[in-house]
Image: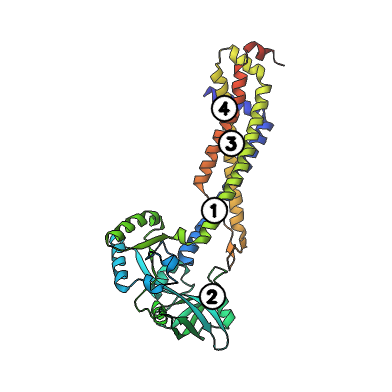
Amino acid sequence: MKTLKLGLRNLRRNFRRSLTTALSIAFGFAAVALFSGYTKDVYLGLTEQAVHGELIGHLSIARRGMQSQGRLHPERYLLRPEEIMRISGIVRGQFPQARIVPRLALSGLASNGHVSTIFLADGVGPEDMKALRGPRLDSGALSADAPQGVAVARGLAGLLGLKDGDDASLLVSTLHGQANAEDATVLHAYSTGNAGLEDKAIFMPLAMAQSLYDAPGRADHLTVLLPSIALTASARPGLARAFAAAGLDLEISTWQELSGFYRQVKGMFDMIFGFILCIVLTIVVMSVTNAMGMSVVERTREIGTLRAIGLRRAGVVKLFVTEALLLVAAGCLAGLALTLLVRWGVNAAGIAYTPPNGSGRVALRVGLDAGRMLFTFAVLGLLALGSAVFPARRAARRPVTESLAHV
């Protein structure tokens, strides 16, 4: 308790230096906290985009080799109706509330009667589409009352001049390499959120895709929506063992593995966060080291006096370490207040921007990443402790007579 009081008194005595050091810590802490909060919000948005925007779901189940060889030999890798039933039963046995969605992807030419262009289609049941879309129900929805109704990406609709209610012709190559075509009705145009798919993507009912592909009842993979996204990592090993025990040679992929955009953006932001943290830590170490070093030099005679009246060397080190930790605590608390103030201002400003590979503007939001903030506080505290220990130990080791004679 006496050490704490002495530390506070010494910080007040050198108020300007203490304030400068605390402010440098505060601005550094706020910079890290704001960026980590921003990246946390970005990660949440990317997760939402991957699971519901890209319709990846939480898990994807396909025959082993489908991703690498499925387009070359589709008849070998499509799941048959009886296999779909067995897989669904195993998944529901472990997760009764899970939703299993059969999917079938195909590509071909879309035409309005005058102009043709390539398209990439995803066949999925209308009710399954609602479950996959989640909060994005207005984007790419299908209708059970319109078996030939398709949802067309806005870019593709613009290329072909299609409006809601217009008809289009879809030409594809079937499972056995023959040409097949069907007429489709445009239910509505939607935004994919992905610039690379905006002029190509189509959603169609699964039955229509199976008819076009001449693959009744079959699917190229199953998308699984678990009760919670937190179950994704733990669900895969158990399902893999159950499939192997049932004699099913299947691959299970998570949404993180299937969303390359999520992995790339997260990797980039993690690297930037590490870079910013290194800069902030360097500034803090230099500030605290400078403050403690000057304090030790200026208080050499004081240290000699304390040693002369019985304070041990460990007590001197403890005193300076306490001052350094108080500086970090004050700086981090001020940084937290600054973080909350700036966060409120940014979120209230309504700033929007177009993200990389995006097709629409999104709001700039800053969240709160408590884990990284606590980590930053702990690292700053450890570095401050190290910055204070070394000069304090040097001063404590000096002979008492030399310290008292210091000018």
For this orientation, the residue located farthest to the bottom is 113
SS at badge 3: helix
SS at badge 2: loop
Q: Amino acid at mark 4?
A: Val
Task: State the separation of the CA atoms marked 3 and 1.
Answer: 32 Å
Q: Amino acid at mark 1?
A: Gly
Foreground mark, 3 or 1? 1
Q: Kindly identify which numbered label has been placed on residue 109.
A: none
Q: Residue at x 49, y 61 (%)?
A: 259
Mark 2 or mark 1: name the one nearer the start of the chain: 2
Q: Which residue is mark 3?
A: 330
| Residue 339: image location, x then y, percent | 59, 47
Mark 2 or mark 4: name the one nearer the start of the chain: 2
SS at badge 1: helix
Q: Which residue is mark 4?
A: 321
Task: State the separation of the CA atoms marked 4 and 1.
Answer: 36 Å
Task: State the separation of the CA atoms marked 2 and 1.
Answer: 28 Å
Q: Which residue is mark 1?
A: 267
Mark 4 or mark 1: name the one nearer the start of the chain: 1
Q: Is residue 191 left or right of residue 90?
A: right
Q: Which residue is mark 2?
A: 200
